[in-house]
Amino acid sequence: MALVGRPNVGKSTLLNALVGEKLSIVTPRAQTTRDQVLGILTDERAQIVFVDTPGLLEPKYRLQHSMLETALSAIADADVVLLLLDGSAPEELPAAEVLDELRSRRQKLLVGINKTDVASARVQRDLAEWSQKEFGMLPFRLSARTGTGLDDLRNELVSRLPESPFLYPEDDLATQPVRFFVEELIRETVFERYEEEVPYSTVVRIEEFREERTPIYIRATVYVERESQKAIIVGKGGSAIRALGTAAREKIERFVGSPVYLDLWVKAMPGWRNKDASLRFLGYPVPRAESEPGEKT
């Protein structure tokens, strides 16, 4: 099941709540998710593979083009698609291009209103009317934070899944390797500790991961777009990166269940978000979409 919607509608929080484990990073800022994150829920009835996707946005640079294409690809590939709407920001609706894509796959589409614990009755009514007008269906009323509506959603998903052998072992919770989640936990910590554009210009890659050692040795590089951003990440006398490393290490230790030695480095990769060669080097899919006028590729 693909989870899709505008940035910050709560897709990652909902994935974590449905699976019962923190797999997708969550911050108050929009556009945090860049990659597909697959979470697996297995019970006696079914195995549901949830796909958390980047927010459906109007792309402004090459990385965002890549993120949008990743989300649209998930819509095309999924057995079931849940369009999540934000009850706390009812004006944030998908763009026309995305709505066309969703209408073309209406038979496998579900709609959910998230954050009903803070959304007014009027807003919920307006979004329900919008859903009926656009897709001819009533939305699920959900709160990923409190768990409201999640059982009904799971039951509906199970009824819609095709019959097949389980795709993954029953005790698996995710498909990505541990390194991926370590990178995401470091990036989440960057979002929590830095302001302005710095978090959005940041990407983390694991250079070395030695599980045979105690503590586990992890060397990671934090890439930014400008030398000035590198100076901000490092801080005066290295104070900021030490604090970043301490906070990220504590999260990683909880995730892997073992002591960790985290060795953080910072490098500037000028304009990486807008360069196909840099996106390829960092492991992002290079978007098919043409650049906007004036963009560097």
Image (cartoon, rainbow, N blue to C red):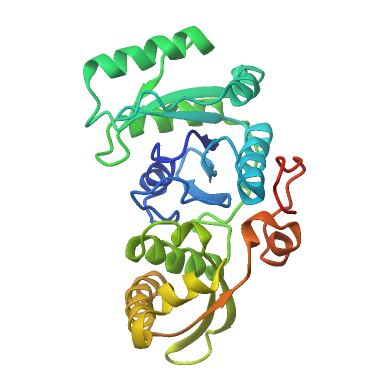
Residue at x 63% of width, y 39% of height? 74
Residue at x 30% of width, y 34% of height? 143
Residue nearer the viewer, 278 or 261: 278
Residue nearer the viewer, 262 or 178: 262
Q: Quadrant of residue 116?
A: top left
Q: Quadrant of residue 272?
A: bottom right
Left/right placement of residue 133 relative to residue 168 reads: left
Residue at x 52% of width, y 56% of height? 174
Expressed as whole percent of the image width and height from the top left, the position of residue 47 reads 53, 43
Expressed as whole percent of the image width and height from the top left, the position of residue 52 reads 51, 45
Expressed as whole percent of the image width and height from the top left, the position of residue 229 reads 48, 69
Q: Tell which residue pokes out farthest to the bottom in this image.
A: 213
Vertical placement of residue 100 versus 276, above or below: above
Q: Quadrant of the C terminus?
A: bottom right
Vertical placement of residue 71 versus 181, above or below: above
Left/right placement of residue 98 relative to residue 222 reads: right
